[in-house]
Every structure is written in C-alpha cells, then in structure tokens.
Image: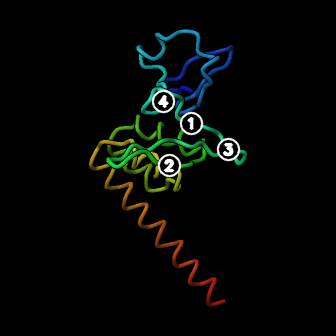
Amino acid sequence: MYAVKLPLNIGGRRRKIGELIDDAEVKSPELVSSGYLVKITGASGAPAESISPEGLITLPVIRENGTETVSVAQSGIAEAVRIMQLSQADAVEAVKTADNDTLIVLDLCEGNKTIKSAVRKRGSELAGKAKAEAVEAGEA
C-alpha cells in the first residue's frame, strides 16, 4: 500500500494527496524515490495495513515494549498526510478542526513539536466534549 504525497496520474486516474494506492497499481519504484508516493510498511517490511469490514485500516505502532495496533478510518490517514505537508502555521490551524482518527495518525507520525502540541490540545478538547456528552446523556 502506498500513500500519495504529491498529486500524480496512476492507472489513468488523477490521484490526490493522501489517497491510498494498492501495490499492484504502482509500476514504477521511482515514484517513491522522487517523493510522489510513500510506501506504508510495518517494522518487518510487510504491509502495515489491513482493512476491516467496517473500512478501518489497522496500522502497527512500534513501542519500546513491542508492537501494538491502532485502527483508523482511511479518511483520517489521508487528512493526516495532507496536514503533514502544510506549513507549520497552516498545519496548526488545520489541526483545530481535525477528527479523532486524523489526530491519532498525526500524534504517531508528526515530529514537529509545535504541531504535536496542537494535536494533543485538540485531542484533549475532543475528550472533554465526549465526557461532557456522556454526563449529559446520563442525566437525561
């Protein structure tokens, strides 16, 4: 599986930033070395994702004590890839409206401290909203 980093045409279709492409569709490895695509792989080099019946993609997360997995929607991965290509200021602004799946991917992959701080702040906001909604539902 590959993720599009720069717009390009593959298989007669225009591919957008963040779109995922199956291995079988990519005929030229130069697309990776030239920066158009990024190969999504696990620690062993095996494909990192598996798509569940619900359409969630499971990605490995390598930790000090082993590997765990996280499942996110394809749209969350695509949006995270899009945000990672923005300038720092634009990325911080985009994070303010990001959904939980996008935040998970950004938290795992983004190295910029300012953006990572914005991701964690937004995650706390979403967690606070979810907790408030749960309390309201319990009171009703």
The residue depicted at 44 percent of the width and 49 percent of the height is 94
Q: CA distance from mark 3 to mark 2?
A: 18 Å
Element carrying mark 2: helix
The residue depicted at 27 percent of the width and 48 percent of the height is 113
Q: Of tags 3 and 2, which is closer to the observer?
A: 3
The disc at residue 102 is: 2
Q: Which residue is mark 1?
A: 49
Element carrying mark 3: loop
Q: Extreme bottom residue here? A: 139
The disc at residue 124 is: none
Element carrying mark 4: loop
What's under tag 2, amino acid-wise? Thr
Q: CA distance from mark 3 to mark 4?
A: 17 Å
Q: Are marks 3 and 1 in contact (CB under 8 Å)?
A: no
Q: Earlier in the sequence, mark 3 or mark 4?
A: 4
Q: Extreme right residue here? A: 53
Q: Which residue is mark 4?
A: 41
